[in-house]
Image: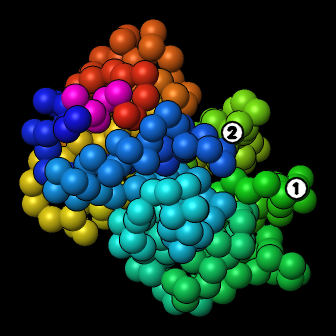
């Protein structure tokens, strides 16, 4: 086999996880073989995700369980990006968190004071928003009160949906939209398409041309362009061929049915 002529021209490959490498608990067609070919060709890899529900360690375990060899250094999550951003803020600032336990850990590790479950929730100075499976209206209510009281919103992304095995699920963007509408305020987005996650990956990988491979026009393609990178779109996730072919400024450098077909020549 060997790499396709397109992919062989890059030193690094930045891979989106949901919809590109896997859907739910299953790999996309021949994804392990595609990643093995990239490693055999000496390409350095990074795995990026806007899904805030799990820690980097959990993603590494999932990758291995699906036959995809990966190290912790290769995984760049939106939770880690949020922690990096908060670490530059004043330690001990009060934060109301919407998110899975992994996001709570990232916020705490940044030195912030989490006020969930206290009578100070509405007085939080920051609201961190990340979609999770147990989201409840009470979280939306408390976050709305905090933002109306002057809190800044920091969001894990604007993805409206993400692909699961039984179809599309609502993403963080659905919660962000509700909060922005309720408060007439705008959240700062840390996940894709913000370029910070791509830059974090490149800081780890080093110099050289890099290709982003993802399934979303609005986050993977747009985020890659914001970071000055080329991007290819695979059709195993959210974006359709019609949407990918219609994309302009930026345009994808390639459109493929799935990761393996793009990578292997």
Q: Residue at 17% of width from left, 50% of height from top? A: 41
Q: Residue at 45% of width from left, 9% of height from top? A: 242
Residue 89 in the image: x percent, y percent? 46, 80
Classify residue 204 as left or right of residue 61: left
Q: Which mark is residue 164?
A: 2
Q: Which residues are magenta?
A: 261-265
Depth check, mark 1 against mark 2: the one in front is 2
- Quarter in which the C terminus is drawn: top left
**Front in this rendered view, residue 76 or 1:** 1
46 shown above or below 24: below
Q: Is residue 118 magenta?
A: no
Label 2: state its secondary structure: strand
Tag 2 or tag 1, which sits nearer the N-term? 1
Question: Which quadrant would residue 252 be assigned to in this image?
Answer: top left
**Front in this rendered view, residue 30 or 140:** 30
User: Dot 2, crowdedness within 10 Å: few (<14), some or many (≥20)?
Assistant: some
Classify residue 23 as left or right of residue 2: right
Q: Which mark is residue 250?
A: none
């Amino acid at each position: 086999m060997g790499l396709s002529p397109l992919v062989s021209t890059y030193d690094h490959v930045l891979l989106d996880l949901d919809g590109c490498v896997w859907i739910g608990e299953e790999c996309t067609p021949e994804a392990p073989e595609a990643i093995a070919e990239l490693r055999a060709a000496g390409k350095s890899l990074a795995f990026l995700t806007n899904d805030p529900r799990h820690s980097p360690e959990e993603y590494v375990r999932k990758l291995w369980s699906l036959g995809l060899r990966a190290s912790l250094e290769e995984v760049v999550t939106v939770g880690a990006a949020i922690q990096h951003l908060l670490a530059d803020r004043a330690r001990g600032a009060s934060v109301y968190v919407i998110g899975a336990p992994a996001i709570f850990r990232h916020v705490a590790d940044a030195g912030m004071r989490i006020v969930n479950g206290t009578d100070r929730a509405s007085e939080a100075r920051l609201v961190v928003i990340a979609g999770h499976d147990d989201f409840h209206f009470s979280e939306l209510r408390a976050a709305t009160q905090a933002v109306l009281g002057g809190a800044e919103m920091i969001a894990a992304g604007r993805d409206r949906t993400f692909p699961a095995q039984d179809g599309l699920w609502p993403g963080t963007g659905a919660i962000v939209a509700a909060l922005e509408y309720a408060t007439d305020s705008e959240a700062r987005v840390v996940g894709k398409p913000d370029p910070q996650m791509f830059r974090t990956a490149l800081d780890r990988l080093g110099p050289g041309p890099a290709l982003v491979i993802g399934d979303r026009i609005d986050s993977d393609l747009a985020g890659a362009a914001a970071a000055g990178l080329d991007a290819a779109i695979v059709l195993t996730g959210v974006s359709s061929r019609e949407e990918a072919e219609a994309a302009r400024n930026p345009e994808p450098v390639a459109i493929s049915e799935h990761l393996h077909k793009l990578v292997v020549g």
